[in-house]
């Protein structure tokens, strides 16, 4: 092999250095691209997690909270899914006791958020204890479970209006406020005052 002059050695050296620099730059660029891809992937995963959290919150926000009391095994406040019926609330509270007068309430009525479900107890002659005497007639009556007999104990409410109230409640899937009864035919301002005083959501 012929001897290389100093100028040739310098040229070859410069070429080698240039190739090394180009190779290092290419490796660095490839590494940066991978890191960017990983960052984008992590960001996408984070976005999916955020969406899942929002969906979970949206699902729980559709639940109903009801107060179940009266002749049930475990009276208390329970959370039920939207669209649940009175019968679901009774079952959630451990079911009706042997003293319950289930035929006096509409088990098929839809529940409203904040509603109180009162399962009446049997009184003398099978009459619900809520209306078995003069003293009990002054007690509060559950808006969502009031029977025709219970409604008739309220001043200004007769058999026809009481039946209209129960029918109105059933047709609307339950009631969340006494003020909704203002839509029932035959109920005026004076009767509304009596209803507000005796009924509770």
Image (cartoon, rainbow, N blue to C red):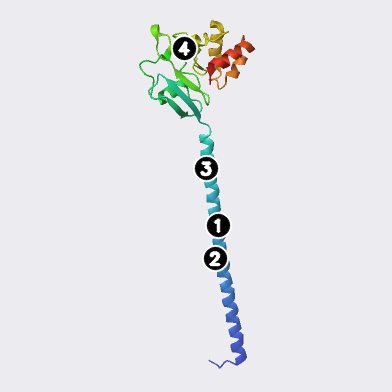
Mark 1 or 2: the one toward you:
1
Q: Could you say where residue 24 lies in the image, as x and y percent from the top left?
A: 56, 73
Q: Give residue 31's mark.
A: 2
Disc 3 crowd rating (10 Å Cα; few below 14, some 14-19, many 20+) is few
Q: Secondary structure at mark 3?
A: helix
Residue placed most toward the observer, 172 or 64: 64
Mark 4 or 3: the one toward you:
4
Residue placed most toward the observer, 16 or 121: 121
Name the residue rendered at 57%, 81% in the picture. 16
Vertically, is 121 above or below 47? above
Mark 4 or 2: the one toward you:
4
Q: Could you say where residue 63 lies in the image, as x and y percent from the top left?
A: 50, 31
Name the residue rendered at 62%, 11% in the picture. 190
- Check contact, mark 4 vs mark 2: CB within 8 A: no
Decide if residue 113 is on the left or right side of residue 122. right
Vertically, is 201 above or below 185? below
Q: Earlier in the sequence, mark 4 or mark 3?
A: 3
Q: Give residue 39's mark.
A: 1
The residue at the far right in this view is 189
Q: Could you say where residue 89 lies in the image, as x and y percent from the top left?
A: 44, 24
Residue 160 shows in this picture: yes
Residue position marked by numbered label 3 in the rendering: 53
The residue at the far front in this view is 135
Residue position marked by numbered label 4 in the rendering: 136
Vertically, is 102 above or below 93? above
Q: Secondary structure at mark 4?
A: helix
The quadrant holding residue 132 is: top left
State the separation of the CA atoms marked 1 and 3. Answer: 21 Å
Q: Earlier in the sequence, mark 1 or mark 4?
A: 1
Q: Secondary structure at mark 2?
A: helix
Question: Count the marks: how many?
Answer: 4
Mark 1 or 3: the one toward you:
3
């Amino acid at each position: 092999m012929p001897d290389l002059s100093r100028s040739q050695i310098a040229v070859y050296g410069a070429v080698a250095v240039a190739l090394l620099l180009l190779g290092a730059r290419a490796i660095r660029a490839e590494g940066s691209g991978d890191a960017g891809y990983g960052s984008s992937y992590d960001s996408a995963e984070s976005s999916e997690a955020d969406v899942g959290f929002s969906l979970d919150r949206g699902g729980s926000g559709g639940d109903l909270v009801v107060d179940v009391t009266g002749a049930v095994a475990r009276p208390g406040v329970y959370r039920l899914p939207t669209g649940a019926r009175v019968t679901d609330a009774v079952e959630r509270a451990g079911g009706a006791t042997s003293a319950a007068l289930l035929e006096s309430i509409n088990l098929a009525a839809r529940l409203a958020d904040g509603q109180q479900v009162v399962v009446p107890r049997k009184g003398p002659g099978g009459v619900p204890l809520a209306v078995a005497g003069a003293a009990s007639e002054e007690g509060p009556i559950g808006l969502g479970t009031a029977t025709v007999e219970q409604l008739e104990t309220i001043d200004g409410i007769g058999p026809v209006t009481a039946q209209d109230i129960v029918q109105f409640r059933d047709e609307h899937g339950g009631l969340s406020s006494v003020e909704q009864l203002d839509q029932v035919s035959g109920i005026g301002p004076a009767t509304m005052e009596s209803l507000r005083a005796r009924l509770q959501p």
